[in-house]
Image: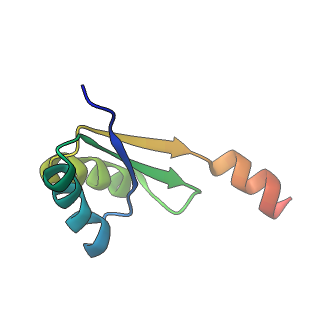
Amino acid sequence: MRDPIVLAFSGGLDTSFLVPWLAERHDRPVVTVTVDTGGLDEAARASLLERSRTLGAARHVRVDARAAFFDETLS
């Protein structure tokens, strides 16, 4: 596998457009990454994964940063 392009992925219009565009333009797999700081419920997490797959991402990674965000920001 060629080195992937890693894309910070919100699931919005801009990042959704970029998944297939980057893959086609650069002929490389795209890995989408979402950093979860606590604003996503289970349905939103599942939706991001499904949207990423539907758009053709090779993989979707969710970084669980809820504890770190809480520790660094709220405590």
From this view, report whether residue 65 is shown above or below residue 40. above
Q: Residue furthest right?
A: 75
Which residue is at 52% across, 63% downward?
A: 39
Which residue is at 81% across, 55% downward?
A: 72
Q: Residue furthest top?
A: 1
Q: Which of the 4 image quadrants contains residue 2?
A: top left
Look at the image and tell me in which quarter the N terminus lies.
top left
Which residue is at 25% across, 63% downward?
A: 18
Which residue is at 38% across, 58% downward?
A: 9
Camera-nearest residue between 66 and 5: 5
Residue 57 image position (x, y, % from top left): 22, 45
Camera-nearest residue between 61 and 30: 30
Camera-nearest residue between 36 and 29: 29
Residue 23 image position (x, y, % from top left): 19, 50
Look at the image and tell me in which quarter the C terminus lies.
bottom right
Task: Name the colour scheme.
Answer: rainbow
Residue 45 image position (x, y, % from top left): 37, 51
From this view, report whether residue 53 is shown above or below residue 75. above
Side of 27 where 39 appears, left or right = right
Residue 5 image position (x, y, % from top left): 34, 45
Tally the numbered discs: 0
Q: Residue furthest front?
A: 26
Camera-nearest residue between 72 and 14: 14
Q: Which of the 4 image quadrants contains residue 58?
A: top left
